[in-house]
Every structure is written in structure tokens, then in C-alpha cells.
Amino acid sequence: MNLHSSTSKTLWGTAVTGIAIIVVGLIASMLNYGESILWLGLLILIMSPIFGVIVSAVSLFINRDYAWMTVALVLITMTAASIILAAYL
């Protein structure tokens, strides 16, 4: 698994998916339907860097680059901890 290729495909895919869902959400909002679709698209866009780091960590594990995989896991842990703290504070 190529690190750069897999990470860029993940980031590109989540960005396109998030934008497409936002467009659908905007159309639905104009028709007085679910605003939640719009929020789902925004959530996907916000989470796309985290998905990229997760894919990078898996790719680094497969390539046996344990030092950088540890850095990616620390980043994922810190991000998860900040999300949990933000939700409960």
C-alpha cells in the first residue's frame, strides 16, 4: 500500500463525498426538508483529515514503518481525546 496514494485518495474521496452531500443538503433545505443532510456533509468534511491520518497509520503499519505509525497513532489519540473533552465540557 503506497502511503501517499492511499492518503490522497482518502482525502479526495471524503472531500468529494462531503461536498456532494452538502449540495444535496442545500437543495433539500431550499425545499424545506432535512437540514441534517447539510450537517452530515459538514461533518464528513471536518472528519476527512482524521480519516486521512487513520489510512496513513494503516499504510505505515503495512510498510513496517513503526516510528511514523506511532506518530500517527499519537495524533489520532490526541484528536479523539480533544473531541471527547469538547463534547463533555
Image (cartoon, rainbow, N blue to C red):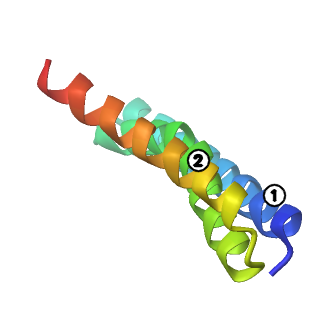
Q: Residue furthest front?
A: 67
Q: Give the side of residue 50 with respect to residue 81, left or right.
A: right
Three-letter code for the amino acid on which mark 1 is drawn: Ser
Of 73 and 48, the residue lying toward us: 73
Q: Residue at image x 38%, y 36%?
A: 39
x, y percent for residue 45: 56, 41
x, y percent for residue 48: 58, 47
User: What is the total number of numbered labels drawn onto the structure image?
Assistant: 2
What separation in Å lies between label 2 and label 1 (alpha carbons)?
Answer: 11 Å
Label 1 Cα crowd, 10 Å radius (few <14 / some 14-19 / many 20+): some
Classify the position of the C terminus by image quarter: top left
Q: Give the side of residue 53 with respect to residue 29, left or right.
A: right
Of 44 and 70, the residue lying toward us: 70
Q: Taking 30 as reference, is 1 above or below it?
A: below
Q: Residue furthest top?
A: 89
Q: Which residue is mark 1?
A: 8
x, y percent for residue 38: 42, 38
Of 76 and 88, the residue lying toward us: 76
- Corner quadrant of residue 5: bottom right
Of 50 and 67, the residue lying toward us: 67
Three-letter code for the amino acid on which mark 2 is drawn: Ser
Q: Which residue is mark 2?
A: 48
Q: Residue at image x 64%, y 61%?
A: 69
